[in-house]
Amino acid sequence: MINRTLIRTKAVQLMYSWQNNPQPDLQFSLKQQNLSLNKTYELYFWLLLLPIEITKYAIKRIEVGLNKLRPTAEEANPNKRFINNRFYKQLLKNKTLADYIEKKKIGWEEDNEFIKTLYEEVIGSEIYKEYMAAPSTTYDDDKMLWRKLYKKVLAVSENLESQLEDMDIYWNDDIETVMSFIDKTIKHFSEDSDENQELIPMYRDETDRTFAEELITAAVTDRDQYTKMVVETAKNWNEERIGTMEMAILIVALAEITTFPVIPLNVSLNEYIEITKYYCKDDSKNFVNGVLDAIASRLKKEGKLLKVAVVK
């Protein structure tokens, strides 16, 4: 789940936080990076818990209505389709999810008002209303309900955004990517899935974990060298344009360009330009692109930038 785009973004965030600090200790840097990436993976599980907690709240609402001395007709004969959703029941029994929750001691139990708010957003959506009003539903309908609710309701919920920001300042930067992996997770479920259904692992394979460690190692170890390269090159533009975030992006980009010969130059450049678009002013992407392109061209001429062709 922790893909290379996320790894690059986390490295830039860490480098940004260190721009006004003395040279950070490498082991401390690696520890902080690992903590940051683990927190992003933790967000995956917090979000996976939402169908369970929202449905549990719905069950309580139905129970309260049934226990009234004089329930309304709707309360006396509630539509239980939502609380009997088959995908929700699979998620409720999933061992990987349960084990992670137990290990990390996470959960929404102390956030009843927040869950109530999300429940109200869900039942107020056309997605929910159409699902509940359908003549009948299949397993695929049950699964599609939650795919749609994640995409159209939860992903755009200001209440969820605010809650996550209170929990971790970087989670709102991660939510779009993590939501895409939530969607992939749901698609992997089938009607035959049992409690052993696999969820998405933290890393696709060991090469991504190694990439994360080597990227931050290069950025931290050679920060001064990369900074000097940027400052010397930026004189051709306007050195004063180098903001703290722009410098962080340039340092990490140069670390990748000079450390990973198997990653094509255009791939690295495109990735960091996208990060620049997200974090910086509109015109910063041209500046960052120009500086990186000039440095890469010079390193090529000096024989210091070698790229290995990847054989497929």
Image (cartoon, rainbow, N blue to C red):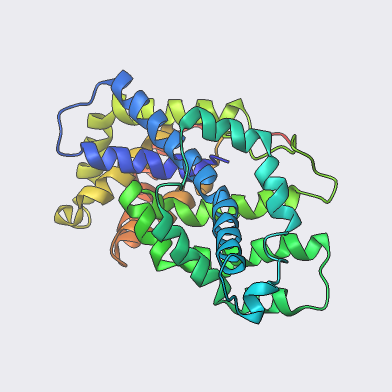
In the rendering, at what x and y percent does residue 23 appear? Answer: 19, 26
Name which quarter of the figure residue 217 lies in: top left
Q: Is residue 287 visible?
A: yes
In the rendering, at what x and y percent does residue 284 appear? Answer: 30, 61
Residue at the location (44% across, 66% down)? 117
Residue at the location (48% across, 39% down)? 42
Q: In the orientation shown, which residue stands out farthest toward the front?
A: 69
Q: Nearer the viewer, residue 160 or 300?
A: 160
Q: The N terminus is located in which quarter?
A: top right
Left or right: where does residue 237 sit relative to residue 35? left
Q: Is residue 307 visible?
A: no
Left or right: where does residue 297 sit relative to residue 187? left
Residue at the location (62% across, 67% down)? 66
In the rendering, at what x and y percent does residue 127 appear? Answer: 64, 75
Q: Nearer the viewer, residue 189 or 232?
A: 189
Residue at the location (50% across, 71% down)? 121
Name which quarter of the figure residue 33 lies in: top left
Left or right: where does residue 198 sit relative to residue 65? right
* Number of numbered discs overlaid on the protein picture: 0
Q: Nearer the viewer, residue 121 or 34?
A: 121
In the rendering, at what x and y percent does residue 133 appear? Answer: 73, 79
Q: Is residue 264 above or below residue 207?
A: below
Q: The C terminus is located in which quarter?
A: top right
